[in-house]
Amino acid sequence: NGWLRYARLPSAETLHSELPVHVLVLNSTETSPVYTAGSEVAQGIGSIFGKKCSVGYSSGYIPPDNATVIVGTIKQYASSGGLINGIPELEADGFWLNISGSEVQILGQNERGTLYGAFEYLSLLAQGNTSQIAYASNPDAPIRWINQWDNLQGGGTHGSVERGYGGPSIFFENGTVKSNLTRAAQYARLLASIGINAVVVNNVNANESMLTAPIMDGLKRIADVFRPYGVQLGISLYFASPQALGELDTFDPLDGAVIEWWHNRTDQIYKRIPDFAGYLVKANSEGQPGPLTYNRTLAEGANLFARALQPYGGVVMFRAFVYDSQNLNESYWKDDRANAAVQFFNGLDGQFEDNVVIQVKYGPIDFQVREPTSPLFAHLQQTSSAIELEITQEYLGQQCHLVYLPPLWKTVLDFDMRVDSQPSLVRGIVSGQRFNRTLGGYAGVANVGTNQTWLGSHLAMSNLYAFGRLAWNPRLDPASILQDWIRLTFNSDPTVLDTITSMSMESWPTYENYTGNLGIQTLTDILYAHYGPNPASQDNNPWGQWTRADANSIGMDRTVWNGTGFAGQYPPQVAVMYENISTTPDDLLLWFHHVPYTQHLQSGQTVIQHFYDAHYAGAANAQTFPSRWATLKSKIDDQRYEEVLFRLTYQAGHSIVWRDAINNFYFNLSNVPDQAGRVENH
Ligand code: GCW
């Protein structure tokens, strides 16, 4: 159940008199999120407090009972005679929560909003908070989607999950949709509790058979188990599907037969799933076909799907992760994969249909331990955009290392692009506010699997939880989100709270310290696993993830005056900061500049000495994690205590492997001794 444990509170009995005894649900249709909201509230109160709460349904009359929770939409409430004076205007998916002792109103702008309000109420109760409050809550952005990279097969009888570390797919087996979708429903419940409104269930490296009748029938079954939780279903498309299925001899997006084919398939999906969310498209990237195959623009490709979806209100999430790995060659100083997205989308702003959202990874390369914000966010002003964040820890320890990601995500969400020299925070751009867009938001690559913990590790679930909370409100503080998660997942014991908070908040800087510093990227094995140290693989690879390290110097020169020109893709005030070494922050120095190992940082340290010191500091801190965790023995259940301890002990050891591999590599390459005399002794 993740954070939805609803564990009995120690003080449960003393609070009974302040609690409702009845839940009145204003919609009695079992598949409706309002119905779900009512059942959750009654079940939650029973479980947290051991107090029975009866549930009744009414669509016409609200009896003047005391001690009742009223659960419904604003509209249902008003038409049942409820007074809505004083309730602020809500936005789509928003809710009004009014807790006045044992009398509670949970009213959504729509059915889904009501369910969100119910989960918020339960989150307060489960954390022991029974205070009287009344407030409205609205999401910051309409798109709050999860992407799963699940394959139809490949994981034994189950589908495999690309970059998934929590077991095989909960959706697919033997090349088709699973017959038992219990886990899919539980997943939808978890996601609804953090405000997620859609899930794309299959890998962006998609398969054309998603659009065959048996699979579309299976997708209908997934949509049916999602629906009571207000979660819509979306799918990833294989661009060349009409041809790959042998139905047409082309997939040219401007060909009349191709257009008709996609309209037809889209109609078939909506016949089965009337509330289908839309398509996610990875095109012309890493060997995937796309519009460029026919010399058509990315906009022409995206619009093909957008027009087919328009009659139904569906959305196309079109990925900006477009680059050509065949054409990257490190022997050219100016070759740079980081330039690709802005170059490929150049001139297309304004050419996309209104129901297209460009889905942009947070950085210009690929989910590294630190990247500058993707400059593409500044270029899409007449086009909606969404930020793609990776919850699955591909380059960040694959759930075997504790890395709490929101502090990393916040560096991007709070980054000010200074478009037209005006405040232009990324979170304001993706929410649609900065450029007055009606769509936009958040896509989180989660990749949960059949493992009992969902993500393969108990502590990794804080990232999934926080993703939803931040997509709803990106102004929230990562530490306070984390503490809600700790109280819900474990308990409110101060040692539990302090220990998990401090370890988690230190975890990203710690991981950065022992993997790759100063913006050099995660120095991992780039060729296949993306796991463990392998700095040598970071050069001469076709993926364009390069460090250009040699005997004397290191870093990518991305300046306009002498390098790849990437710094110039930002609006002028930001470009000028990155163009100059003296104004580039230390933590991105090697992303933007190629410098001698002996270059002094703003901190006063040299680059190479910083490498040595940071790797020692990071590994030393990771080695404190097991003993800090050990203070929680008997304060949480044994099973989770032991399972987390096992992972943290592994991490402590692996951090030493990382430290020594990286330090020895750069010592051997540069021959610059470590001032503290540690490295050459190995
Ligand atoms: O980071 C790379 C991953 C691939 C992934 C790709 C993408 C789904 O290593 O596994 O493919 O990005 O985001 O499309």
Image: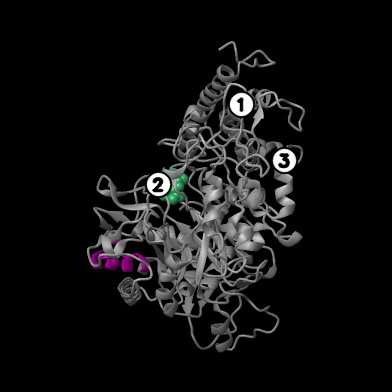
In this orientation, which residue lies closer to the viewer: 132 or 581?
581
Report the quarter where the C terminus lies. Answer: top right
Chain-order first, disc 1 or disc 2: 2
Q: Kindly identify the amino acid type of the residue bearing the numbered disc 3.
A: Thr
Q: Kindly identify the amino acid type of the residue bearing the numbered disc 1.
A: His
Q: Is the residue marked by circle 1 packed among few (<14), some (14-19), or many (20+) residues within 10 Å?
A: many
Q: Kindly identify the amino acid type of the residue bearing the numbered disc 2.
A: Gln
Q: Nearer the viewer, mark 1 or mark 2?
A: 1
Q: Please give the residue where the numbered disc 2 appears in the rendered image.
A: 452
In this orientation, which residue lies closer to the viewer: 145 or 609?
609
Tag on residue 615?
A: 1
25 left or right of 257? right
Q: Does the magenta-highlighted stretch encompass residue 440?
A: no
What range of the chain is rendered magenta?
210-223
Q: Is disc 3 placed on a helix, strand or loop?
A: loop
Q: Please give the residue where the numbered disc 3 appears in the rendered image.
A: 584
